[in-house]
Image (cartoon, helix red, strand yellow):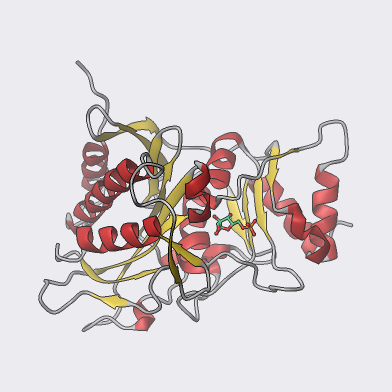
């Protein structure tokens, strides 16, 4: 019986195309897929297990830390910190960088992740996700902040897991973006979306229009014109970045989380939300911008740096940039 291409097999076959690859990388992606399976198992019973609900703590951003956030954060650390593949990690749930402890061997990669994005949706059974990004360590000896403050272009791998009607892992290493669907009966991620191509122009726009009056005028005008004409766009907003992004990646469309009068840099984080999804969407033929520059070119000056995010179909993002640059009124 042909079970289809497993994630492990696909990674190994892809690695063979890169003679310089060392296998460390393949192991790291496999480690992450194991963490994803465990998180998926607990997400799927969040209503039953004690992972549901909040911890009573808030993270560095003043947001309520859901039990699953903490569980997933600790799990990803535990699954990857002892393998000798990483030099350090950083996460939305940790104030500072996490150098691999002396007791473990250290490797050449840096892992940055959002363990559970959209966690406020856990209790209402809405799809949530894990987002990850991998860089090569630049410093010659022990890991420093500078190893984490990279441009998106320096990523060697990025992707996400969406815990929805099915659990899917989507990743890129710069040779296209590929999707794998978890077959729970096998416990394997099987190739289901090879070389994802996002439509050049979409049919959906995803934004929290409750913030409309706080947006800059060009962004408001861009959204207004999406509603005009003979074929207006449909609004789809789940309030879970990975879920909104994933639908637009497959169907076409643009996700917007602009800066506004209250938060000029917007809400979403550059290193472990915008940059990894920007890598995935660019590899699928799409685009990601902060309104004037590609997300992948933005310098990171601090770990939890925020950025306005416009991401999805290439032509939709280009039109948004024309409005922001005053080339469209
Ligand atoms: P708002 C979830 O809290 C999150 O970080 C993203 O997953 C999501 O896209 C965004 O915030 C939703 O924010 O302000 O629309 O509730």
Q: Quadrant of residue 69?
A: bottom left
Residue plotted at (39% across, 49% down): 172
Ligand 1 falls in which quarter? bottom right
Can residue 35 be seen from the camera position used here?
yes
For the C terminus, the quadrant is: bottom right
Front-lying residue, 287 or 275 = 275
Front-lying residue, 140 or 261 = 261
Front-lying residue, 232 or 13 = 232
Task: Give the answer, above or below, for where 217 lies relative to 145.
Answer: above
Would you say 306 lies left or right of 262 here?
A: left
Task: Give the answer, above or below, for where 138 lies relative to 80.
Answer: below
Q: Residue furthest toward the top?
A: 1
Would you say 3 lies left or right of 56 here?
A: left
Residue plotted at (11% across, 71% down): 105
Q: Residue 26: horizontal and vertical position, in percent?
A: 22, 51
Q: Residue 233: horizontal and vertical position, in percent?
A: 76, 38
Q: Residue 166: horizontal and vertical position, in percent?
A: 41, 33
Can residue 126 be seen from the camera position used here?
no
Q: Residue 291: horizontal and vertical position, in percent?
A: 69, 63
Front-lying residue, 44 or 138 = 44
Task: Give the answer, above or below, for where 61 lies relative to 131.
Answer: below
Q: Quadrant of residue 180?
A: top left
Would you say 258 lies left or right of 8 here?
A: right
How many marks the image carries: the answer is 0
Residue plotted at (68% across, 38% down): 202
Would you say 146 lies left or right of 23 here?
A: right
For the N terminus, the quadrant is: top left
């Amino acid at each position: 019986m042909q079970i289809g291409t497993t994630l492990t097999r696909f990674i190994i076959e892809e690695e063979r195309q890169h003679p310089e690859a060392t296998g460390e990388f393949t192991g790291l992606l496999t480690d992450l897929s194991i963490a994803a399976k465990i998180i998926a198992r607990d997400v799927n019973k969040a209503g039953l297990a004690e992972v549901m609900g909040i911890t009573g703590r808030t993270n560095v951003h003043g947001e309520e830390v859901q039990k699953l956030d903490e569980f997933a954060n600790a799990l990803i650390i535990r699954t990857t910190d002892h393998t000798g593949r990483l030099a350090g990690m950083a996460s939305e749930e940790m104030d500072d960088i996490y150098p691999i402890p002396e007791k473990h061997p250290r490797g050449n990669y840096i892992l940055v992740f959002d363990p559970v994005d959209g966690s406020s949706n856990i209790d209402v059974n809405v799809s949530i996700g894990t987002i990850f990004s991998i860089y090569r360590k630049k410093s010659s000896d022990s890991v420093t902040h500078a190893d984490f403050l990279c441009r998106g272009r320096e990523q060697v791998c990025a992707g996400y897991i969406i815990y929805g009607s099915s659990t899917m892992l989507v990743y890129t290493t710069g040779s296209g973006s590929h999707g794998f669907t978890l077959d729970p009966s096998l416990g394997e991620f099987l190739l289901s979306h090879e070389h994802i191509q996002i439509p050049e122009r979409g049919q959906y726009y995803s934004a929290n229009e409750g913030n409309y009056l706080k947006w800059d005028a060009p962004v408001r005008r861009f959204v207004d014109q999406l509603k005009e004409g003979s074929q207006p766009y449909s609004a789809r907003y789940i309030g879970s970045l990975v879920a909104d992004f994933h639908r637009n990646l497959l169907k076409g469309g643009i996700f917007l989380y602009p800066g506004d009068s209250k938060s000029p840099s917007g809400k979403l984080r550059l290193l472990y939300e915008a940059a990894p999804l920007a890598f995935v969407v660019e590899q699928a033929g799409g685009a990601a911008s902060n309104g004037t520059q590609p997300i992948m070119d933005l310098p990171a000056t601090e770990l939890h740096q925020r950025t306005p995010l416009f991401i999805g179909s290439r032509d939709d993002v280009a039109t948004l940039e024309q409005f922001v640059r005053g080339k469209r009124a």
